[in-house]
Amino acid sequence: MLFPTYDDLQHRRARFTYGTAGSPTIEALAQAWTELSGAAGTVLTPSGLAAVTVALMSVVNAGDHLLVTDSAYRPTRQFCDGVLARFGVEIEYYDPLIGAGIVASLRANTRAVLVEAPGSQSFEMQDVPAIAEAVHARGGSVIMDNTWATPLLFPAHARGVDLVIEAGTKYLSGGSDLLLGLTTANAKHWPALRRTFDHFAMCAGPEDVFLGLRGLRTMALRLREHGQQALAMAEWLQARPEVLRVLHPALPDDPGHAIWKRDFSGASGLFGVILKPASAGAVAAMLDGLELFGMGFSWGGFESLVIPFDCKAYRTATSWEPGGPGLRFHIGLEDLDDLKADLDAGFARLRAAR
Ligand SMILES: *Cc1c(COP(=O)(O)O)cnc(C)c1O
């Protein structure tokens, strides 16, 4: 980026001054996302996890107390415990179902509360407006990982959240072919977020931003399809004899259904299943033979995925005793009957190996 004259350079008189500070492509996606989110501003980061870390770093200081939901995305926990704790932030995990009861956990030095709904892998819903009201009354900030719903299905800022994170790697992409994060802030939190982002120069790559901008055009359509397919699949799985429980807030008998119905305008394609007790070998027999479902962590693309999960390995504030092995599904855009046939054959292998 070049300046036409000495005087222009001295006064930084140019729309774009340096690569890490922005570009027309970055500005186009950031502006669109800001508008979609009802925010004051957006920073684009090279991954969803970077969007989480820049949000946290813009708010907490040494000596602060940070409350993190026990259902948070696991690498978020690892950043809190591995980095923020080293810099003198006291991290405390809380029960995701705490709601307005969060008030009992707030201390004089509680700077922020991190929420995520539904929970990563466990899919509990959180009463975000109630938490936000309690935290704001004490002068704290609320940070939310909204990757599951996107701003289209949960308008987090309008529900009281100050800083909102989206892993654009997931639904904004839709193609499983980029890494991108977006953090939005309301007017009060925007200057600190922008400043922190600039200090870290944590900028996203131009190709990923371009692909994100392209994905934005079809995100609403794709989300609608993922949501419908996933709910149909969740209902089908609920009726299977091998399944103990389905974790999906849009199912009427889900414990989080009332909150989901009140606050969200739809569901995306990710949900969990607890199988009736089965050996690891039987689960492996089911998953290894699947033809359409891939096994991988990053979701939100066109393809259906399944991974085994066990929250017991890392939970600290609550216990996780689901009563059987957990599987997390992402339902893609393939034909639903083909997907059911793939799982039907998988269940036959599970039964045979049990
Ligand atoms: C995937 C994911 C992230 C991180 O996104 P990356 O781009 O993979 O770093 C953050 N939060 C949630 C809920 C996610 O699912």
Image (spheres, grey):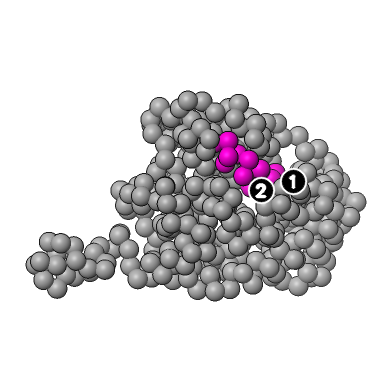
**Residue 125 located within the stretch drawn in magenta:** yes
Residue corresponding to mark 1? 256
Residue 146 higher or lower than 278, as above or below? below
Residue 319 higher or lower than 340, as above or below? above
Residue 70 point in image, percent of width and height: 62, 36
The residue at 30%/59% (across/down) is: 20
Residue corresponding to mark 2? 118
- Report crowding for label 1: few under 14, some 14 to 19, many 20 or more residues within 10 A (C-alpha): many
Q: Nearer the viewer, mark 2 or mark 1?
A: 1
Report the side of 93 relative to 257 (left or right). Answer: left
> Could you say whether the residue bearing mark 1 is in a helix, strand or loop?
loop
Query: Is residue 59 in sight in this rendering?
Result: yes
The residue at 38%/34% (across/down) is: 61
Question: Is label 1 within 8 A of ligand 1 (CB to nearest ligand atom)?
Answer: no
Task: Check disc 1 and give the amino acid type.
Answer: Gly
Query: Is residue 120 in sight in this rendering?
Result: no
Instruction: Report the magenta residues as a range.
Output: 117-135
Q: Earlier in the sequence, mark 2 or mark 1?
A: 2
Say which of 277 and 190 sits in front. 190
The residue at 76%/49% (across/down) is: 257
Residue 125 point in image, percent of width and height: 69, 45
Q: Total marks drawn?
A: 2
Report the side of 214 relative to 122 (left or right). Answer: left
Residue 102 point in image, percent of width and height: 61, 32
The residue at 42%/57% (across/down) is: 41
Quarter location, residue 3: bottom left
